[in-house]
Amino acid sequence: MRCRAVISAGVFALGCATAGLATASPAAAVANGSDVPQGQYAFAAKLALTGVPHPGGSTYNSVCSGSLVAPKWVLTSGHCFHDANNNRIAGAVPYPTTVTLGTSDQTTKPGETRKVVQVLQAGPNDAALAQLDQPVTGITPLTVNRATPAAGQRLTLAGWGSLTAANPKPSTKLQQGVVEVGQVWPTTLGVHGVSPANTTSACAYDSGAPYFLPSGAGGQLVAVENNGPDCPHSGLETTSRVDLIADWIAGHIG
């Protein structure tokens, strides 16, 4: 999965796995991408997770990406929220988690911050809804795509992950890139980089990052980041389709 542990209180531990699956290699901010200008993609969310449990009994801090889909809801990867046995969990947020939106450069503009109070898992898809403690106003959420994606379709990726798989760390600047759908599978899409390079790809801490069709201040969400090879790479990245869970999302966000 595209998440990594962060050194915390002198303890380092890897984490994030989907229920029933072994821990996979992690993902980061968009590698070989480009900076997002301030004011664009305000819906892109950076989730800071604190005290994430590890099977060995230690804890660590981590980061995921996501997107605002309603004033009080962010869609991200389901594997960002798990118990000490690496099983995805739902309900009250399992560890302190904050969401930052409304900025593309945290060094010049801190953005708006909310706390996550509840997590809802999508089931077969590696996706989850994170409910915020207070609504976000002044930011246009992404709409959720309901059409079956097609091979050759081009999407924009925006994430807060690392720029490289070597000693990865979350980015303070939102990164973007264009990818193309190479494969359409029952619950996922295989995408590959197009611009700025054919190696433009998600990296560590990009778990949950949106793949979308931009339109005005918002756009249409097609998939969320799941997992792939170490970045940067020119191979297929696995993303979770949202058209299959559009009704589920609508039933919760209203």
Image (cartoon, grey):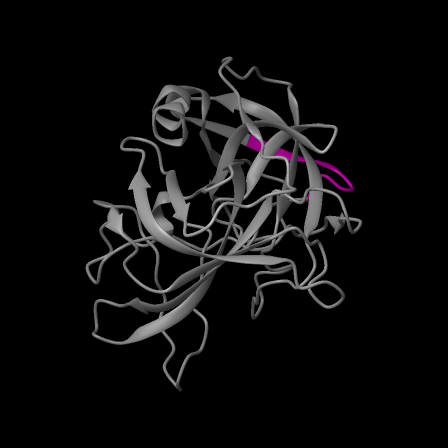
- Residue 165 position, x and y percent, is 57, 61
Residue for point 34% across, 32% down:
125
Choose between 175 and 108: the one closer to the eye. Answer: 108
Instruction: Give the number of callouts.
Output: 0
Quadrant of the snapshot with the C terminus: top left
Residue for point 22% across, 51% down:
87
Q: Is residue 119 magenta?
A: no
Choose between 161 and 39: the one closer to the eye. Answer: 39
- Residue 207 position, x and y percent, is 48, 48
- Residue 198 position, x and y percent, is 71, 39
- Residue 213 position, x and y percent, is 66, 26
109 displayed left or right of 90: right
Q: Is residue 193 magenta?
A: yes
Q: Is residue 202 visible?
A: no
Residue for point 34% across, 48% down:
79
Q: Quadrant of residue 11?
A: bottom left
Residue for point 72% across, 59% down:
105
207 displayed left or right of 43: left
Q: Is 172 drawn above or below residue 82 in the view shown?
A: below
Choose between 234 and 167: the one closer to the eye. Answer: 167
Q: Is 161 drawn above or below residue 50 in the view shown?
A: above
Q: Is residue 62 visible?
A: yes
| Span highlighted in magenta in the image | 191-199
Choose between 228 and 250: the one closer to the eye. Answer: 250
